[in-house]
Image (cartoon, rainbow, N blue to C red):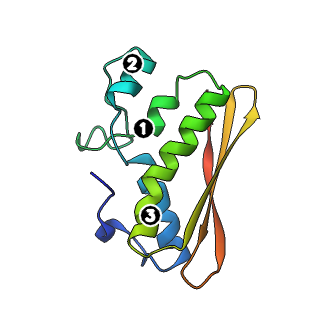
Amino acid sequence: MNHFQLSALTEPIDSREGMAHAVRQSIYNYAESTQNDRARMESNQRGGSWSNELIEIVGSRDWTLKRAKLTDETLRLAKRFYQEALAWLIEQGHAKAVEVTVWREKPNQMGRNVMITLSDGSTFDVPLTQVNK
């Protein structure tokens, strides 16, 4: 699964609300855990998602970081996961650029933000909720 269906958006993707929705859905529902993720977690779990009770074909690599110790490597993985999940926005022409920022908010809390540059050159932030480690 590369990304969710655009018909799931509550607002058009060319609106800020629609783009923010697309960003969040892409990050939280992008892909299930890989073999490397499972080895790193020492678990065979495929990755959880808020929708697990409703549908099991969706997974989240973001979820695989939930129990990880907050190290520089964890921050690098998070940034890579988000960039991969959001690449389709550029590939399909919905955004000109996507800038992902992750940082250590507190000793065990990661801060995350996504800045979208739209095709017209305007930018806006999509803050993501903090992930407690």
Q: Which mark is residue 119?
A: none
Kindly identify the amino acid type of the residue bearing the numbered disc 1: Arg
Dot 2 or dot 3: first in sequence order is 3
Of callouts 3 and 1, which one flags the residue occurring earlier in the amino acid sequence? 3
User: Can residue 132 be seen by looking at this rendering?
Assistant: no
**Left or right of 51, for residue 80:** right
Which residue is labeled 2 in the image? Answer: 39
Other-residue count near label 2 (Cα within 10 Å), few / some / many at <14 / 14–19 / ≥20: few
In the picture, which quadrant includes the C terminus?
Answer: top right
Mark 1 lies on residue: 61
Q: Which residue is mark 3?
A: 22
Amino acid type indicated by mark 3: Ala
Tag 2, which secondary structure?
A: helix
* Marks 3 and 1, how far apart at CA: 16 Å
Name the residue nearer the viewer: 34 or 46. 34
Residue at left offset 56%, top offset 68%: 97
- At which x and y percent is residue 108? 69, 26
> In front of the other: label 3 or label 1?
1
